Image: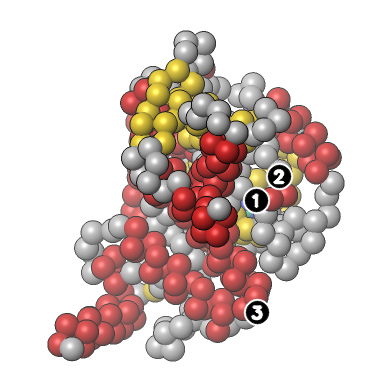
Amino acid sequence: MLWLAIGPFHAMENQVLVIRIKIPNSGAVDWTVHSGPQLLFRDVLDVIGQVLPEATTTAFEYEDEDGDRITVRSDEEMKAMLSYYYSTVMEQQVNGQLIEPLQIFPRACKPPGERNIHGLKVNTRAGPSQHSSPAVSDSLSSSSLKKSSAELKKILANGQMNEQDIRYRDTLGHGNGGTVYKAYHVPSGKILAVKVILLDITLELQKQIMSELEILYKCDSSYIIGFYGAFFVENRISICTEFMDGGSLDVYRKIPEHVLGRIAVAVVKGLTYLWSLKILHRDVKPSNMLVNTRGQVKLCDFGVSTQLVNSIAKTYVGTNAYMAPERISGEQYGIHSDVWSLGISFMELALGRFPYPQIQKNQGSLMPLQLLQCIVDEHAKTAKRKAST
Ligand code: ATP
Ligand code: MG
């Protein structure tokens, strides 16, 4: 009865875990893991990558007691799977049955050759369990959403995302690098957000950007903005994404703590997801956190294409007030720099003002470098103080 007191998960900690990776149409590979409960989602993807080197696997599934497939895309979902598996093992032990390995089914993306020309993709998942509800209510039924995104997927899968099919409506906002429009996609009858950026670059660079944007195929998270496609017309790129009817968090001023807490969970999950794909966001700030009336919070404008980030930086010179000190000083950028920007953003949202009183952000978030020196200096002073204590 001891396991009842400490819980099945802990009682199993020292046991060897066998994960059976099912290979589509050709059997399975067994993987023995010695520290099952500590296993991370990324570890499993790494091993799947070795077993299926040809495919790009971004998630996997397991079966519950009814044979229904459940998708795993994060450490949290991994924990839920392991906890479910260990409870079935416990049952098998109590009944004196043979312990079955944990079977998982890799979910692979299509290889590049099979994709449509613009890299179109729609996030069709609308499961309520993955949504946080910060301040807004669910106004659409899930069946109508499923239907509409399936229709959109069908249309977009034919590679038809182009300028002719798009009717620009309102301007949603101007950023430092472009303008975002609310637009109507004629073939599907759906509303999109289209970011248009003027870029005077060579055809070669345009091609490189398009191929770098391909990684957006891999992004399949309810905390990341859905990507429909991108195209160049003359010297401007249009990036089509899901429209978020609540806009971005920068306009909400001071957000109450209980709401902000839920938003923070979604944003951290979005960032963790990007980091698990080895993508750094590089532009974490309230205007890149979007909300909708279904209570979802999603990240946008992450630096998936190095060439696009560089081209924008060359055209629109400036320094961002949310940048980490090491970035302002031109040092190496890492996950910790995203975390800095996350902290500054949430302080701003909690306080209702930018946390550095010296910095007034009246005209967008780009700042002269001298003004941002205080971020670097204050950090250095704190670091010095810490080192001397
Ligand atoms: P930067 O150019 O530095 O990223 P920014 O984020 O303010 O600054 P844009 O990314 O061009 O600028 O976005 C402008 C505005 O458009 C945002 O502040 C946001 O309110 C709105 N917006 C952007 N994407 C969407 C979207 N998918 N759905 C709804 N509104 C959006
Ligand atoms: Mg933005």
**Nearer to me, 93 or 359:** 93
- Camera-near label (3 vs 1) is 1
Image quadrant of ligand 1? bottom right
Residue drawn at x 50%, y 30% is 99
Q: Give coordinates of residue 145: x percent, y percent.
A: 78, 41
Which labelled disc corresponds to residue 130?
1
Residue drawn at x 57%, y 38% is 94
Dot 2 corresponds to which residue? 127
Contact check, label 1 and label 2, Cβ < 8 Å? yes
Q: CA distance from mark 1 to mark 2?
A: 6 Å
Q: CA distance from mark 3 to mark 2?
A: 26 Å
Residue drawn at x 65%, y 75% is 258
Specify few, some or many for label 3: CA neighbours under 10 Å numbering under 14, 14-19, or 20 or more. some
Q: CA distance from mark 3 to mark 1?
A: 22 Å
Dot 3 corresponds to which residue? 256
291 versus 239 height, above or below: below
